[in-house]
Amino acid sequence: MHELPYKNTPVASQLEKIALALDMLESAETAVRSARHLLSELTGAKGIVQKQSLTQSLSDVNAPEMHGDLKIIEGVFDGERMIGKDNHQYAVPANYASKSKLVSGDLLKLTIHPDGSYKYKQIQKVESKNIMGTLTYDGGKYKVLANGKLYNVLLASVTYFKGEVGDKVSIIVPEHQETDWATVDVIIPQTDTDYGDEEILQEALQKDAE
């Protein structure tokens, strides 16, 4: 427990309570982290871990506010929509999310004008990584199978790259949180057999950057 500079005084009594509260918070945070780690190891629990991680990210954004006639809402991207600080879900245009390569966990700011028009802005990127997978079609939706897991991807991204089932896909996923959604970075057509995957990937990324 935290050491007190002096004892047996009214001030010391208050400090003892504060120190006890701090220790309780530390213990609770440790227990929550352990519980999340345990859930991530259990089959079917990843969706729960993702929701908790995204909700935790909301502590880094501001509450909805008015700037004159403009309504400003900040939130976290869940791979398809934005979850606002007010816990409401806001539609994110698929073309914008695809072109901007938004990743689940990115923080966004939504500005709504009096006429109903709106604009999104990315205000913070989540730590992420690239992994390779294969484009599949499951349950009427395109998905990417990577590292033994199926990830949801935006249809707009697949159609932009003219992807087909069986194509190799470089996807972007959060580094430190579980998610059911991935961001398509580039699709490598399965007909490109004259070069290795690495050469094709680098060439595609260079063209995309241009």
Image: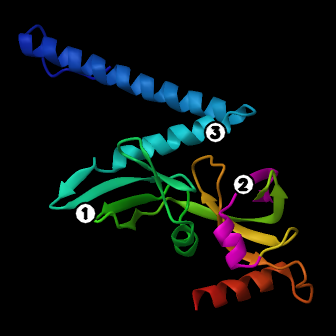
Name the image quarter holding residue 132.
Answer: bottom right
Residue 55: image x %, image y %? 46, 41
**Label 3 sits on residue:** 47
User: What are the residue bounds of the magenta stretch?
Assistant: 142-162
**Label 1 sits on residue:** 114
- In the rendered image, which quarter contains the C terminus? bottom right
Horizontal side of residue 87 vs 71, given as left or right: right
Residue 75: image x %, image y %? 40, 52
Q: Residue at x 71, y 79 (%)?
A: 161
* Mark 3 element type: helix
Name the image quarter holding residue 99.
Answer: bottom right
- Give the mark nearest the N terminus, 3 or 1: 3
86 in magenta: no
- Give the mark nearest the N terminus, 2 or 3: 3
- Point out which mark residue 151 bears: 2
Horizontal side of residue 171 vs 135, given as left or right: left
Q: Where 148 falls versus 109 (above or below)?
A: above
Q: Where 12 falls versus 184 (above or below)?
A: above
**Could you tell me if the residues under marks 2 and 1 are in contact, i.e. CB atoms within 8 Å?**
no
